[in-house]
Amino acid sequence: MRAFTTLTALVAPLDRANIDTDAIIPKQFLKSIRRAGFGPYLFDEWRYLDHGEPDMDCSHRPLNKDFVLNRPQYQGAQILLTRENFGCGSSREHAPWALEDYGFRAIIAPSFADIFFNNCFKNGILPIVLPAATVDQLFKELDDGYQLTIDLSTQTITTPGGQNIAFNVDETRRHRLLNGLDDIGLTLQHADKIKAYEAERAQRAPWLF
Amino acid sequence: MAGKTLYDKLWDDHVVHTEDDGSCLIYIDRQLLHEVTSPQAFEGLRLSGRQPWRVARNLAVADHNIPTTDRAQGIADPVSRLQVETLGSNCKEFGITEFHMSDIRQGIVHVVGPEQGATLPGMTVVCGDSHTSTHGASAALAFGIGTSEVEHALATQCLVQKKAKNMLIGVNGKTGPGVTAKDIILAIIGQIGTAGGTGYTIEFGGDAIRALSMEGRMTICNMAIEAGARAGLIACDDVTIDFYRDRPYSPKGDDWHLAVRCWQKLHSDADARFDKVIEIDAASIKPQVSWGTSPEMVLPVDARIPDPAQEADPVRRQGIERALQYMGLDAGQKITDIKLDKVFIGSCTNSRIEDLRAAAATIKGRKKAASVKQVLVVPGSGLIKQQAEAEGLDKIFTDADFEWREPGCSMCLAMNADRLEAGEHCASTSNRNFEGRQGYGGRTHLVSPAMAAAAAIAGHFVNVAEDAA
């Protein structure tokens, strides 16, 4: 997994609450057995005027010019600013895969759905929870070329005006993301504990063993 | 010291290791696998040269892409076919049991698990699917995970988790006529919102919940995720234990008696402390119909479509306006005036035998309205299909011009050939009414099986409470 340390990047605003993972990546693209290549289909039903299907060449599809990510000033954005309960619904990890493949490395919102939030950390994407009033302030400040600097080690966001905004990430998740560590490898360091647990549990619940 | 909640008990029973910041390594008793969220996990195992930690704790079944028409024809869509075949080849390579498309035990993964006794009370259950919360109806700690965690659970039989907070939703009193488990959970989501349970495990309690069958309890826990909670729970009682007696994967002989003694403790202690408690009067719940593009956009069937102008909060107002535009509905319109193009009875929420019986009982020898183009009835598993046919339910459906199909996820998310066309309104017993969920531009109304069947007959929503009274 790609580590996340610091990021200074353009911000794209998606001013809508309760964005679900069906909207982030519609189901027809979930038929892929690969992990890469979902970026062109990110927000497919909002981004294009036609109906997308897997393996379509998106370079010739009609764009919905009203959709915020299609506006010229947000091309190359790596930070997504959005509203509460982002990523609700289906557990599909294809949602963070699509966001990452498109180029997003961080998402700022007042709240996230639990499964999506968790999936982000497995893919080098930093989801940042800020108070609703602070998110509102960022939406208001945002103008063309608006960039934020995110520092995960100090857990700080710096605005173009020089304001520092603190955020908080669980220590275990922060450490793993900062170093791009492989979760499975770390868990397997506890192999003896897992085996000891199994031996003890087999006494209490033999029908599971 | 305060007593423990059911969630506390299940959690404590599965902790393998605790980190300084409170993150825990949790042992997983059962992983269910399906074709959509597993191929990249198996590929990860291959790339790292790892093997499943305990292969027998995994069970696989393809459900999302499976055709619900003649199985002998195979899968027409080559992309869907490859995904289903990939599950087969992965299971074969790693030695995992899979119920194939031709196996009568095949069905929707969350229907198959309890039906086989593969998910049991007291277990931790995971699956790369958010509706894994369904299995919490058996007092199991069950939650959906992403594909990276599917690989993690395969490789280590554990997951790194942080404990959620405890919420109790007590539903007390007696439900009125025509009110089902689906109406109870939709009313709850309407009240607390789709983020109301975020960060919590929700235990559903109260006499209206205890009065439900296992099927009804599964409907309730299935949609805990639609209230934002990864896991829903219902305490184990005699209904639970009776359900699991003699299931193929249930414990047998002495193990059964030992298991039952353990399962009888799977309830919250009388003095357990919850972080949040919500009380709901069962008698106040009416049959529900969703009108918008989020499960929280739901109202009693006798209500009118909300007016965004009455909403003070700008983000919410914009949400209502967008939903009305997408759904092609007008503020103030009566819900009973919404005309249906299609009806879908199925999904991991409502495809069990009790759901099919309720739909069949509603029909009473009538036929679908001529204005309704298609009514799909999709049983949750091959065994449920067999049971329904033994009871003659299939005949009741086909006599009403409903289509009786093979088991699978079908039009809940339209990954197979079953879908809505743009602009079509569908009365659906599924769980999500998101934009495009049942097909590009499709308009979903979430309802109970009885409401779906009644709407199929009338061509529009009807107050099933009056019918049933």
Image (spheres, coloured by chain):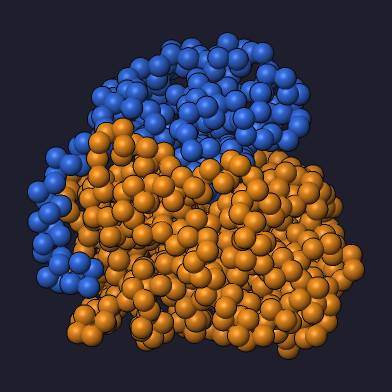
Res A66 → quadrant: top right
Q: Chain drawn orange, letter?
A: B
Q: Residue at x 41, y 54 (%)?
A: B33
| Residue shown at 51% from the left, 70% from the top | B104
* Vertical order, B96 against A81 (above or below): below
Outermost right residue: B370
Q: Please, which residue is most extreme toward the front here?
A: B72
Image location (x, y in percent) of residue B235: 37, 75
Quick one: quadrant of the N terminus of chain B? bottom left
User: In the figure, B65 relative to B1: above or below?
Assistant: above
Q: x and y percent of residue B125 in the render? A: 35, 60
Let me know if residue B401 appears in the view.
Answer: yes
B14 relative position to B280: left or right? left
Of residues B104 and B359, which is closer to you in this image?
Answer: B104
Q: Nearer the viewer, residue B244 or B14?
A: B244
| Residue B276 visible in the displayed image | no
Residue shown at the point (21%, 36%) measured from the top left? A185
Foreground of the two, A115 or B270: A115
Query: In this picture, is B121 found above or below B364?
Result: above
Q: Position of residue B240 (x, y in %)?
A: 39, 80
The chain painted blue is A
Where, quadrant-wise, is the C terminus of chain B in this rendering? Answer: bottom right
* Image location of residue B200, percent across then percent down: 40, 56
Instruction: Please identify the quarter of the rendering in which residue B242 is found.
Output: bottom left
- Numbered circles on residues, count: 0
Residue at figure coordinates x 83%, y 82% from the top left: B366
